[in-house]
Image: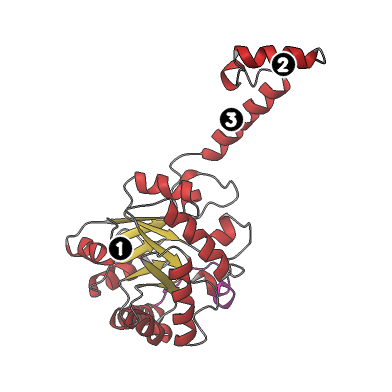
């Protein structure tokens, strides 16, 4: 049985910290779930860590549907949350509902969708949740608005902007969001918001006082040499391990050491007799 949004909200009430990690395919999602992580984000961060773009803006709804479907196939227990990508929900609540429904139906039936934005999208969150689709909200540094924000900059760094973030969070909770991602804001601001909300806050670069944390899987695993966000911790350097394994493979192929008999299929006696006749031209 899958984790539900009620389970996630109960974790906050029980003061149980919530771990969330991104995944973009069946293999990585299976490993994340096997590690005991209750919530998986199919993030539009795939635009950067999978597709190789500089931002998330180029990710399409079709991309998100495809990757969400893969993650759903690779999991059985985790609550899967899928990002609605750039400009698929900001035009109108009806546009958001239409696209959220597509992501749910064509993406393999994830448990929720995620939207970036503050009080301005509260009516949209209310419309989508009223239709029966759970919504995780996202405020602070919102990657889909990176150009408007002037780059990858921390948000809420003065009292006025911190007040706005608190008002955004309260409006989104009132609109029906089951949880809110707080990205790259001062930890003191995140603490204030977390204490004021009855729904869980999921931090990324927002300090220890959030109810949970979300991280991008390639960052945790050290897969990307050129991307090392301040908010992430590298638990292993898989890039070096993978390069080493592939270098060993190349060396063994070039030296004729791979494959060996252990990796080969052998014909039975009857087939060997037939092959001998073929070799003689019989």
Residue 122, horizontal then vertical, whole percent: 38, 84
Task: Give the residue number, with chain letter if any, for mark 3.
Answer: 245
Q: Nearer the viewer, residue 221 or 183?
A: 221
Quarter of image, res 21: bottom left
Q: Is residue 169 left or right of residue 266?
A: left
Quarter of image, res 249: top right
Q: Nearer the viewer, residue 66 or 113?
A: 66
Residue 141 visible somewhere in the drawing: no
Is residue 68 inside the magenta stretch?
no
Q: Nearer the viewer, residue 206 or 249?
A: 249
Question: Which quarter of the figure is the N terminus placed in?
Answer: bottom left
Position of 49 relative to 154 (above/below):
above
For label 1, the SS is loop
**Residue visible at 58% across and 59% down in the picture:** 48
Residue 53 visible somewhere in the drawing: yes
Task: Give the residue number, with chain letter if any, for mark 1.
Answer: 210
Magenta span of residues:
145-158
Residue 17, horizontal then vertical, whole percent: 26, 56
Task: Give the residue number, with chain letter if any, for mark 2.
Answer: 275
Q: CA distance from mark 3 to mark 1?
A: 38 Å
Q: CA distance from mark 3 to mark 2?
A: 36 Å
Are there few (<14), some (14-19), or many (20+) residues within 10 Å of tag 3?
A: few
The residue mark sitting in front, 3 or 1, is 3
For label 2, the SS is helix
């Amino acid at each position: 049985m899958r984790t539900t949004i009620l389970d996630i909200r109960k974790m906050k009430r029980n003061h149980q910290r919530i771990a969330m990690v991104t995944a973009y395919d069946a293999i990585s999602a299976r490993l994340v779930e096997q590690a005991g992580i209750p919530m998986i984000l199919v993030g539009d961060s795939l635009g950067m860590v999978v597709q190789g773009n500089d931002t998330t803006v180029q990710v399409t709804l079709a991309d998100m549907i495809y990757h969400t479907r893969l993650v759903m196939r690779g999991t059985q227990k985790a609550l899967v949350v899928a990002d609605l990508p750039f400009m698929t929900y900001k035009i109108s609540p009806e546009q958001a509902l239409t696209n959220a429904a597509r992501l749910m139906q064509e993406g393999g039936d994830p448990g929720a969708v995620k939207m970036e934005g503050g009080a301005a999208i509260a009516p949209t969150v209310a419309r989508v949740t009223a239709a029966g689709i759970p919504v995780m909200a996202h405020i602070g540094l919102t990657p889909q608005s990176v150009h408007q924000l002037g780059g990858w900059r921390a948000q809420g760094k003065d009292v006025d902007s911190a007040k706005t973030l608190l008002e955004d969070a309260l409006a989104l909770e009132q609109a029906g969001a089951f949880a809110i991602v707080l990205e790259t804001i001062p930890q003191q601001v995140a603490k204030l918001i977390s204490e004021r909300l009855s729904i869980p806050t999921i931090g990324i670069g927002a300090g220890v006082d959030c109810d949970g944390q979300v991280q991008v899987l390639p960052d945790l695993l050290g897969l990307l040499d050129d991307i090392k966000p301040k908010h992430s911790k590298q638990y292993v350097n898989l890039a070096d391990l993978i390069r080493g394994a592939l270098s060993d493979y190349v060396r063994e192929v070039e030296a004729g050491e791979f494959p060996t008999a252990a990796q080969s299929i052998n014909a039975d006696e009857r087939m060997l007799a037939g092959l001998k006749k073929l070799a003689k031209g019989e």
